[in-house]
Image: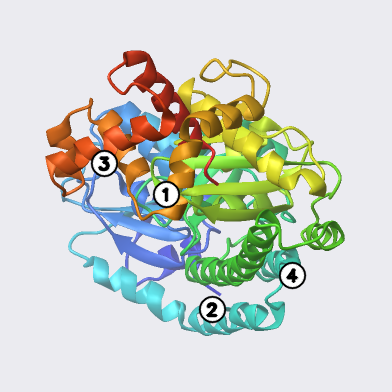
Amino acid sequence: MAITVAELVAEPQLGLSLLAGADGTNNRITWAHTSDLPRLWEWVTGGELMMTNGLSIPADAAGQVALAEALVDSGASALAIGEKMHAPPLRAEFIEACNKLPLPLISIPYPLPFIAIARSVAESSLLEESRRLRQTARVYDLLRTAGASEDHWQSLVLRLATELDAELFVVDRRCLHSWHPDGKPLPGFLAEEWSPHPGQVSVAGKNFQWHRVRGRHVLTMDIPTHANALMVVLPLSEPHPDAVVLLHAATVLGLQLARVVLSLEGRHRLAGEFLLQALDGRLGSAEMERRLAAFEVPAQDFVVASLSADDGDGLANVHIELWRHGVSAASLRRNNRLHVVVAADVADELLIHCASPETTIGISSAATVAGLHHALQESLWALGSARANKLRLARYAEGPSWLGLTGVEEGAALVRRLLGPIFDYEQSQDGDLMVTLKAYLDLQRSWQKTAAALFTHRQTIIYRIRKVGELTGLDMSETSTLAQLWLALQIHEAMRS
């Protein structure tokens, strides 16, 4: 076992003396570390004897007391200060705080080199290192036997917790929800303490950090490879779990999460292929019901949610976030939009929570498999309404109207009436009338700018716009005509799935 503070102070060749904190002399020392940086506690991983020449010690009483409290909160076993160095006078309040906390305060006689203390701690830790290696091997063996299925997640967490003799949780630092749908929620006292500022639970730039919350030591540690995944450890006994072993435990959890996400990506691809076939009319109702059941989505009472984001990467992990929060879904990414089929009773707040802040969401009315394609059109209409009205989320036929129209049917009729002749022409002829019309309207009806944008001659643009007028029977010099065509184009673009 690691050497205790009392055993280190008792070594005669070192000549150490205890100044305060006698009640903490049974603390075990995992390592001896030298630092003269101002925020000494930031370098504590748990169980260290922190040694300083005194430059880390504030001159005022309040600063010294705050240092002692921060060291204890971070899990330091003791503080040692070199004699005749740079330490300011130690205040009575500081000594009292060390006795009360308790934090063993050790005086290092001049000119004893700090390396002599570090060597004594290291020599006493040889057996501890052997124990650590065996425990690390057991931690990785848990990963080997865990299996790749997401169903094995909580079993792995519980077995790791047993190995560490601690309570173990994996949460999302942004919201403190369990990272895995089968994960245990944080204990009430931690949730209450951290909920007002969840994103600040772990100190930025550090792999791990000890906290003291309502009298208990708590470790927060980033899980590698998964942004915002946070391991929370509540030790059940002394000494606390070894810092190195904890790092390996976090790595094991990260590897298991990678397994789970890989499995989810395969499922996501299958869902996308199914929805593509269904929306293209290649599947019958019975087959669609069977496929939706395989994805645990109700076939008779679902909605389609269409999501768009200025940054396309904002859609990449929505299916994972939905799974993490226990929402069964089938999703398809197409034309820089994500279409998700979920149960009709999924709350708006949950959908918003699972999307990135830059994402806009449109939701259809409740549908059955026979109306899947129509539900997609409704969700796209709602998405257009949400974007136009600068809303995070809009439901079809609810909230503010879009472009003065009541819904999909009116919009589709307007598109067909105004743009239908152009679509029909382009099916029988090779032409770029729609592309030219959109560019022409987007560029304030400038022949020259449109020609430059489309890398063609100005006269070609003039010819194409005149052709649009011939096909639609509209006067292209009239502002009202251009307004109608712009409106139809907006609907057409928004309704493209």
Q: Nearer the viewer, mark 1 or mark 2?
A: 1
Q: Nearer the viewer, mark 4 or mark 1?
A: 1
Which residue is located at x 29 percent, y 40 percent? 436
Which residue is located at x 60 percent, y 26 percent? 394
Tags 2 and 4 in contact by the CB under 8 Å rule? no
Q: Earlier in the sequence, mark 4 or mark 1?
A: 4
Q: Against 412, is 173 above or below?
A: below
Q: Against 383, is 257 above or below?
A: below
Q: Nearer the viewer, mark 2 or mark 3?
A: 2
For disc 4, the neighbor class at 10 Å (few under 14, some 14 to 19, many from 20) is: some
Q: How many angstroms separate mark 2 from mark 3 (CA)?
A: 33 Å
User: On the image, numbered disc 3 is attached to which residue?
Assistant: 57
Q: How many angstroms separate mark 2 from mark 4 (CA)?
A: 25 Å
Q: Earlier in the sequence, mark 3 or mark 4?
A: 3
Q: How many angstroms separate mark 3 from mark 4 (CA)?
A: 48 Å
Left or right of 68 on screen, residue 352: right
User: On the image, numbered disc 1 is attached to which residue?
Assistant: 426
| Residue type marked 4 | His
Q: How many angstroms separate mark 3 from mark 1 (CA)?
A: 80 Å
Give how far across and how far down residue 373 sits, in percent: 69, 46
User: On the image, numbered disc 4 is attached to which residue?
Assistant: 152
For disc 3, the neighbor class at 10 Å (few under 14, some 14 to 19, many from 20) is: many
Q: Earlier in the sequence, mark 2 or mark 3?
A: 3
- Find residue 132 and name its label: 2
As rendered, which of 380 and 185 lies closer to the eye?
Answer: 380
For disc 1, the neighbor class at 10 Å (few under 14, some 14 to 19, many from 20) is: some
Q: Earlier in the sequence, mark 1 or mark 2?
A: 2
Tags 1 and 2 in contact by the CB under 8 Å rule? no
Give how far across and how far down residue 406 sits, in percent: 63, 19
